[in-house]
Image: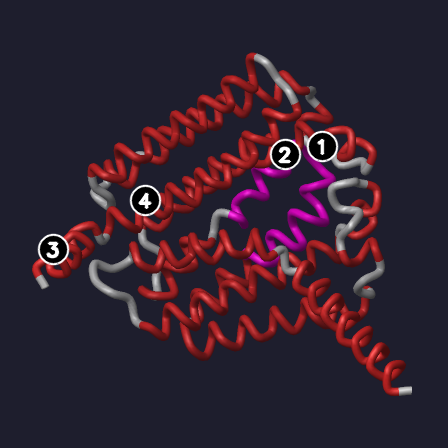
Amino acid sequence: MKAQVSTSSAQSILSMRQLCYAYYELTKPRVVALIVFTAIVGMFLSVEGMIPLSALVFGGLGIGLSAASGAAFNHLLDRRADRVMARTSGRPLPTGSVQTIPAIVFAGSLALLSMVLLISQVNLLTAALSFGSMIGYAVVYTVWLKHATPQNIVIGGAAGAMPPVLGWSAVTGEVGADALLLFLIIFCWTPPHFWALALYRREEYAAAGIPMLPVTHGQQHTLLQMVLYTILLLAVSVLPFATGMSGWMYFVGAILLGLGFLGYVVRLYRNYSDKLSRQTFGFSIQYLAMLFGLMLIDHYQFQIIGFIKSSIVA
């Protein structure tokens, strides 16, 4: 009898862990992590010194919860198409790991909590911009743009480019011109990043009836657009140096990273393969993380150098 109770208890714990993981997957944690990272970089770039701890903690948490809510709503609204595509058929809703009503409650609770945190602990502007970004991604892009035009990811990319602006406003209470440069970088990065994925998943998008650019205009046209957008991204990525927001360290790093990204895309254009398209997609994520990380290091380079010197002397 004890053995049966123990086995039942272990199975119950395992089921609970699986359920918790399923809800965790609803939030698209890897995407949200990149969103929060770029938002935090936006926070630090908005001031010369250190940022208030409350803005960092509550701003980062509120923005993260808002993004997680948008991701969960995206799962809900895309659940029928997700069943068709191999990439998404294993998601919690298509597999039945999470039911529709509990998922709605979960997504709504995340949205409510994020708004409460941002309004009460940060500022109204950041709350309004976060809510607008969530609606832009979860509703405007997912429900309408994604199914209406092959330029869906270009237009819808505006919502995904907002995190550094949200971080900036969380600290300053306003949207500065330099914050819009950060927005522009992510906006230009999004098309070549996502089209690399859409290329090697084009048959799945076609089966789901989603008019991604590789489905409607073909492989070569998409690759040409990727080359053009990556060149534009390279040019835009040096604007923080041109405006004085970042220094030479960032400028050199941005050029090298941009040429690396462009190299992947040009190779893909000349000799396409699904394997190389996957590699390009993977590098594009690393590119954005490294570019924003470089901005952060460049912004605090003198403080970092001073800390290192003082540590050596001590």
**What crowding class fits label 3: few (fewer than 14 Cα within 10 Å), some (14-19), or many (20 or more)?**
few
Mark 1 / mark 3, whichever is N-terminal: 1
Identify the image quadrant of residue 216: top right
Taking the view exactly as shown, the residue that stands out farthest to the right is 1
Mark 3 / mark 2, whichever is N-terminal: 2
Q: CA distance from mark 3 to mark 2?
A: 44 Å
- Does the stretch in magenta take in 128? no
Q: Are circles 1 and 2 on residues that touch, CB within 8 Å?
A: yes
Q: CA distance from mark 1 to mark 2?
A: 6 Å
Q: Residue shown at 75%/46% (left/top)?
A: 88
Q: Residue shown at 30%/51% (left/top)?
A: 296
Task: Please provide percent x and percent y for residue 208.
Answer: 81, 38
Task: Please provide percent x and percent y for residue 125.
Answer: 43, 66
Q: Amino acid at mark 1?
A: Arg
Which mark, residue 294? 4
Residue at the disc numbered 1: 201
Residue at the disc numbered 2: 197
Please tell me whether residue 181 is drawn above or below residue 263 in the rendered image.
below
Q: Residue shown at 47%/75% (left/top)?
A: 119
Along the viewing direction, whichever of 149 and 1 lies nearer the viewer? 1
**What crowding class fits label 2: few (fewer than 14 Cα within 10 Å), some (14-19), or many (20 or more)?**
some
Q: Amino acid at mark 4?
A: Leu
Q: Amino acid at mark 3?
A: Lys
Which SS class for mark 3? helix
Task: Please provide percent x and percent y for residue 142.
Answer: 69, 48
Q: CA distance from mark 4 to mark 3?
A: 20 Å
Determine the main secondary structure of the stretch shown in magenta.
helix
Residue at the disc numbered 3: 309
Q: Which residues are magenta?
A: 133-160
Identify the image quadrant of residue 28: bottom right
Query: Which callout, 1 or 3, points to the residue nearer the camera?
Result: 3
Q: Are circles 1 and 4 on residues that touch, CB within 8 Å?
A: no
